[in-house]
Structure formats: structure tokens, C-alpha cells
Image (cartoon, helix red, strand yellow):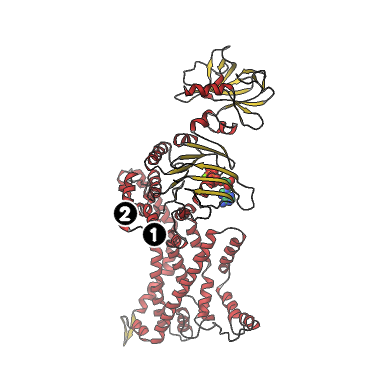
Amino acid sequence: MTSDANPAGRSGAVRTMHLKENLAGLALVAAPLGLLLVLILLPTVSMVWNTFQVPVEGGTVTGIARYQAFFADSYSVANLRYTLIWTLISCVTALAISLGISLYLRFSEGRIATMIHALSLFPLFVPAIIISYALVRFLGPNGLLQLLLEQVGITGYRTPYLTPIGPFIGFVWENIPLPVLVITAGLSQVSDHAIEAARDLGAGAWRILFEILLPQVHRSLLIAFALIFLGVIGAYTVPYLLGPPAPEMMGVFMQRTLGNLQRPDEAQVQAVILMVLSSIVGGFYIATMLRGEVGRK
Amino acid sequence: MAEIRIDKVSKSYGKEKALMQGIDLTIMDGEFVVILGPSGCGKSTLLRMIAGLEAVTGGTISIAGQVVNDLEPRERGCAMVFQNYALYPHMTVAENIGYALRVARVAKAERMARVAMVAGSVGLTEFLDRKPGQLSGGQRQRVAMARAIVREPKVFLFDEPLSNLDATLRVQMRHEIRKIHNRIGATSVFVTHDQQEGMTLADRLVVMNKGTIEQVGSPEEIYERPASTYVAGFIGSPAMNFLPGEIQGGAVILENGIRLPVPGLSGLDGTMVQVGLRPERLSLTGPGRGQISARVDFVEELGSARLAHVLVEDIAISVLTGDKLAIAPGDEVGIAIAPCVVQLFDGTTGKRIETAAHAAQQVETVS
Ligand SMILES: Nc1ncnc2c1ncn2[C@@H]1O[C@H](COP(=O)(O)OP(=O)(O)OP(=O)(O)O)[C@@H](O)[C@H]1O
Ligand SMILES: [Mg+2]
């Protein structure tokens, strides 16, 4: 493990070979990379640039007036705050549930565990729109849940449909499978013996969880968090179908600004703000991945 | 004070056939006991039951006079060293060693002092700030040892702690473990499937086979007087020769009709036996001499010695000798078999049969 590879000691031939391999690798990714550049990066840059162009008499000047307008509008800010808060709440809840399921799967075997594993992956195969309508039918007014509750004499059911809880339930439902996959993979790296050793020296269940297990899977947790966050913050279908008319999640807000209100300039500003938030978490995700790569070397 | 008493302990996993039935073993305070047996015989399971990581299905285990069946691992005062070390990759060496103390809420200053002392005693002082991933196999092994030592346990339990090391390091760590034991004097139970490791480390050896204890005794006793063909075959390298035969008129008649005179067989006529001959206790002589004659099949050069494989009619026998041999495949040779080297085992049960020759040999070794 302490192999002190001394770069200066490497022969020139080896270095040339590495260079050749690198070039071949670059050639392989050149086409998709170019496509990425032309179809994604360029439009993005031009759009971002556009949001800084402020119309004045007889032309435009570069400035941040549009962003000032966004943050001066209380409805826009409310939407942004609503989006952030409920994204975070959904993330934390989905992450906690996924962690619970993963821990259960890590320490149990047998048919029930297999079934729970399969069940936890099930939402992966159901499109968001179907999930949304299913939830409406189940949780909505006069839905299945309400009927069932009334059967057992519980009345006064208040549906979460069209409240912030509606999309929250949808997000959590949608965001169990991938985190479970990621965290289960992380947990399987922790050896049974490490856990037994901790038990042997007197650590209780909570200690083992917080001092042995979680520190060893914190990378998986961060990755899972980023995956959920990025999926939820820009979501459209679930909040559109299940959420309240106001405030709106940014995805819905953006679509309405562009489609119904026909104000592409404002929609662009909203998009850039959303993009900045996403890229913070995205950068975090990439940094975690890279740190892992380096750690393995 | 930390005597371990294993009383009629049995173990089964789920509905499967019992892995162990009625194991009895007493390990005295301060003793170094090695449990030796092939893979899958239940060594780890027995050790884990002592540690409390596995529940017993029946019977009782007591440590220092207290029945521990229902005690949590930490209440038993045992420290276990695992085969793959089971270090915590996210903690430094110092944190790994001190973790047990932290769990036990030992104050930080005392913790650091004890960690530093133990680390010093196993030569880890300069690595205290490293993570396990930055250590060599031998160093990780030391961390695992230090982690156990720092707890000052009543009992050390080792589950094949050396099997992941290369041969040189294994021998070195073996010596260190024995030295640490001599210094600390805690009761130690060491599991291995390496007979040499077992022989060199043990005060007493426990040979296990398929969930039962075949024999308990000092390494010498087990080598010289194996209780069964199983133990005889398992202990000793190269492995003991076994020749089936029948006792008749004070000698063993081998299957191929060859007569092997063994003193002190009176009253055993008609018993089917396995004759056990250790390769290192036999010697080759010129043709026509010795107790039986044989033909050389091939010779293995071992460096310090030579292992001659010879055929007595159709029965293969190996003979270990330190002498340079001027023999070639096909040569006729004689095998000299001193009466005292012949071990007899019952042909059906495999149990040892004591003969007068052994009694005589016992006297010899005593004088
Ligand atoms: N959790 C378990 N469930 C079912 N069977 C088990 C379990 N643990 C061990 N066994 C079985 O018990 C037997 C003994 O296992 P054990 O680990 O004690 O063997 P061992 O002597 O330590 O072998 P090795 O030298 O390979 O470590 C094996 O046949 C194994 O398959
Ligand atoms: Mg084992």
C-alpha cells in the first residue's frame, strides 16, 4: 500500500506510452464531447449571456437589472424559497428512508429482504406522471385512502393533494430507488468483521451506526443526496400535478412564465438561478467523486 | 483467574444438522491454547461463541467462574483479533487502537497515554497518524494486536490472525505474539489451520474435526501419541504413512502379506489395524536389510532433507532422511523400522491402540 511510485524513476518509454493512451482516449470521447459543446454548452452560455443584456433606449447594456427585478418580485422570491425548502425537506426525508432500507438490507437476508429490495426499486420503473396520477387517485379527495378511512369510521380526512405535502410525497416516492442502490453498495463495502470488532469492544448499535457505518458510507450518502437534490429541484410533473397553485416550484413557475405568460426573458433568469443552485450541488457531487478517485489511488 | 470453561456446548445454524455437539474444554488461566483443525470444522464458530458474537445452542461457557451465556461481548472481557484485522478505514491508527477506550469512556489524556504505550510496545509509534490504508499487511496486523492489547482483557481470542501475511512475516509475528503472551500472561485462545503455527505457539493444542474435539494435549503429546488416525494424519509434515493390516501372532500382517514384527501385541490377535509410520522416524538401508524391503519410486529434494517415496509391493510409503541418498527410481532398498516408531490404530474406529513398545518408549524419554 505504501508503494512510493517515483515519477522521476519512470523511463521515458513508459511516459510516452501513457501519452499515447491518453491521446487515444481523447480521440474516443472527442465526438460526444463536441456534441456536448455545440448542443448544450453553447446554448447555455448564450442564454446566460442574454440574461445580462438589459434593454435601454436604442439598444442594450450589460447589467444585472433582470436579476434585480427577479429578487424584487416577492412572488418570485417566494417561489424560490418554497422550491429550496421543499427540495431540502424531500431530500432529507428520502435520504433517511433510503438509509433505513439500505441498513435493513445490509443486515438481513432471506425472502423478505429480497422482496423489500425489489419493492424499493419499483418506483424506478414507473414514470413520474403515472406516480402522480396514482397518488391523486389514492390520496386525493374521495380517493381510496379517504374511503378506507371512512370505512373504519375516521372522517375529516384532509387530502395533501394540492398542498406542499402532495409533491413532497411524490418526490420521496420517486427518490427511494437510486439512493437505496447507492447506499447499499456503500454499506456492502463495510466488512462484517469491522462491525463485529466494534461489538466485541463494547460499541452499541447507535455507536456502530454513527462511528463505524456512516463514516464509511458518507461518500455514498453525499452522492445519493446530490442525486435526489438535482432530480427534485428542477422537477416539473410531480409539483405541477400534485402541488398547490401558489407558491410554485421553480420548474412549474418557469414553464408558466414561458408558456402562459410568454415572457421568455424572465423564464431565462429563473432558469439561470435554478442552474446556479443545481451546479453548487453538482460541483459538490463531482468533488466527492474525484476525492474518491484520488483516495483509491 | 480467567479460566475458560466450555461445558457440553452445542451449536447449530437454523434447521441444519448440528455443527457441534457436546464440546467440553477447559482452558486454564494464563494458558496459550491453540485450536487446530481443517477449514469448516467449526474453529471460528467456537471462538466466536466464547467472544459472545455467536449464541450457543446448548451448554454453558464460563469465563473466570462466571457463566457468560447471556452476557454481551463487551461484558465478557475478551478481546478478539480477526483474520482480516477488521480495522476501521476512516480512523487513524491511534484512533483505531484507542476506539475501545473511547467506547469505554476512558478520559482522553489517559487514553492517549495508553495508546502511545501499547503502540510503542508493538513498534507502531511512527505510524499513529496514518490511516490503515497506508500501512503494510504486517503493520495492520500490529494495529489489530494493539487494539486488543490496549483493552487489557482477561482473554485474548485470535482467529487466524496471521493467515494473510507472507511466510517470513508470519513466523516473525508468531514469535511476537508468543512474546506478548509471555509478558502479559492473559489467557489466549488461538485458532489456526496451520499445524506448524499451532505446534510452535501452543501450551496445549486442541485438534478439532467436523465440530468435535479429537484430542487435547501438549504439542509433543499430540505428535508422539496421536489419539486417532485423524490426528495422526493431520499433525506432522510430511504426513504419516498408514498401512492397513491385521494383528496375528505378535506381528502385523499387512494387506499385501508382508509381516511387520511389533512387540507387545499379545492378546490382540485378529484385530484389524492401521499401522502409522512417521516418515521422519523411518530410515532407508541397503537391500535385504531392515524390517521390510521396498523399491524406490521417486525422491523429492527438500533442500535440508530428502523425501523418498518407496513402494512396498503396491503400498506407497514415504521416508524422510537427512542423508544424501545414492538411490535412483527402481532401486531395491530396505526400510528400518524401530519397534517404538510403530503406532497402531484400530482399523474400524481409528482410535489409538497402546502397545508395550510405547510404554517402554515413554520410560526412555523420561530417563
Ligand atoms: N452464519 C452461518 N450460518 C450457517 N452456517 C454457518 C454460519 N457460519 C458458519 N457456518 C458453517 O459452520 C461451519 C463452521 O464454520 P467456521 O467458520 O467455524 O469454520 P472454521 O473452522 O473457522 O473454518 P475456516 O478455517 O475456513 O475459517 C461451516 O461449515 C460453515 O459453513
Ligand atoms: Mg474460521
Q: Position of residue B252 (x, y in %)?
A: 64, 20
Check disc 1 and report the residue beneath it.
A290
Q: Position of residue B5 (x, y in %)?
A: 52, 45
Of residue B212 and residue B286, the one placed in the foreground of this image is B212
Queried on whether the Cβ of the residue with tag 2 lies below 8 angstroms from ligand 2, the answer reads no
| Residue A155: quarter of image | bottom right
Label 2 crowd bin: few (<14), some (14–19), many (20+), radius 10 Å: some
Q: Residue at x 56, y 69 (%)?
A: A123
**Tags 2 and 1 touching, CB below 8 Å:** no
Q: Residue at x 44, y 51 (%)?
A: B77
Label 1: state its secondary structure: helix
How many discs appear? 2
Pointer 2 chain: B
B75 left or right, relative to B125? right
Pointer 1 chain: A
Q: Amino acid at mark 2?
A: Met
Residue B169 lies, with reference to residue B344, above or below; the image says below
Check disc 2 and report the residue beneath it.
B112
| Residue A41: quarter of image | bottom left
Queried on whether the Cβ of the residue with tag 1 lies below 8 angstroms from ligand 1, the answer reads no
Residue A21 seen anywhere in this rendered image of the structure: yes
